[in-house]
Amino acid sequence: MSANAPNPGREAEFTIPIGLTDDEGRIHKVAVLRKMTGREEAILADRRNQRNGGKLVSELIASCLVRLGELPKGGSNTVERMYSADRNFLLLKLRTLTFGPELQATYTCGTCGESIQVVEDLDQLPVKMLQDGESPDEIIVNLQDGYLDKDGQVHTALTLRLPRGDDESAVAPQMRQNPSLGKNALLSRCLKSLGDVPRHRLEALGPKILADLTMTDRRLIDRALNTSAPGVDLVREVVCGSCGGSFRATLDMTNFLALA
Ligand SMILES: [Zn+2]
């Protein structure tokens, strides 16, 4: 076996949905992961990591990422620069590689309140790859209601970039306190332009702009960043065995990296 071939059983090769662009503009998309070991068990158990999900994911992936394209092994700094969609994809593969694709999940039926147990197959989750001509740094959302500035002008053309690991780490404290305020902080980091609002105003207003948007518009942004963006689609169609109703739910990740 050559030194570059993945170690069968312990290592596996994956193509990530977006990829990491280096300083010369080359995109690195082929990742080799190895199974988690006792070293990663210690990372998972570290209380400092449990307080910051973004940092935990960076540490875990950095520890198990044998190679990403032709990049030199860069540790957690490299992984922090990766898009969240790629990080979540790798985390999912890390789980599958180490513990298998079956995941015990629990959902609550919105109609009858029944608790539904499902064994998910993580290998069956749809993955959307970045298409040719698409840019992870130019996500355009046409707001319906728009942002009303202090002069009474309405701005509707919103441009965002997809969130990265460093964004996740930076907003983790807010996210823990209040997921909605955490989301405002995350999106304001990713906000590139909003109509004619000058750059310095955007930066000064920060998360406040996101808080001022209507829930209609916030849903449009969610859709652009989740359903239509590259990455693993974690939204599931769940059927209730009790009342027969079906509903959409985000994959229950409670037992995702359970050590048991
Ligand atoms: Zn039901």
Image (spheres, rainbow, N blue to C red):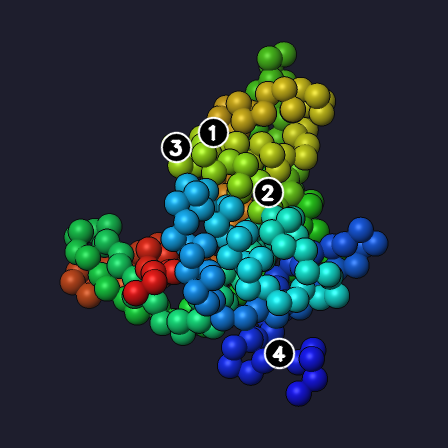
Type of the residue with mark 1: Thr
Query: Who comes first in sequence, dot 2 or dot 4?
Result: 4
Mark whose residue sits in front, 1 or 4: 4
- Using the image as rendered, state which of residue 75 and residue 113 is in the foreground: 75
| Marks 1,2: beta carbons within 8 A | no
Type of the residue with mark 3: Asn
Q: How many marks?
A: 4
- Report crowding for label 1: few under 14, some 14 to 19, many 20 or more residues within 10 A (C-alpha): some
Residue that carries the numbered disc 3 in the rendered image: 178
In three-dimensional space, the C-alpha distance between marks 3 and 4, rounded to whole angstroms, equals: 42 Å
Q: Which mark is residue 1?
A: none
The answer to whether residue 70 is visible is yes
- Report crowding for label 2: few under 14, some 14 to 19, many 20 or more residues within 10 A (C-alpha): many
- Using the image as rendered, state which of residue 198 and residue 102 is in the foreground: 102
- Using the image as rendered, state which of residue 260 and residue 109 is in the foreground: 260
Type of the residue with mark 2: Asp
- Using the image as rendered, state which of residue 181 and residue 97 is in the foreground: 97
Residue that carries the numbered disc 1 in the rendered image: 214
Residue plotted at (54% across, 52% down): 58
Query: Who comes first in sequence, dot 3 or dot 4?
Result: 4
Residue that carries the numbered disc 2 in the rendered image: 166
Residue that carries the numbered disc 4 in the rendered image: 6
Residue 36 in percent (x, y) is at 47, 67
Query: Who comes first in sequence, dot 3 or dot 2?
Result: 2
Query: Who comes first in sequence, dot 1 or dot 4?
Result: 4
- For numbered disc 4, what is the local secondary structure? loop
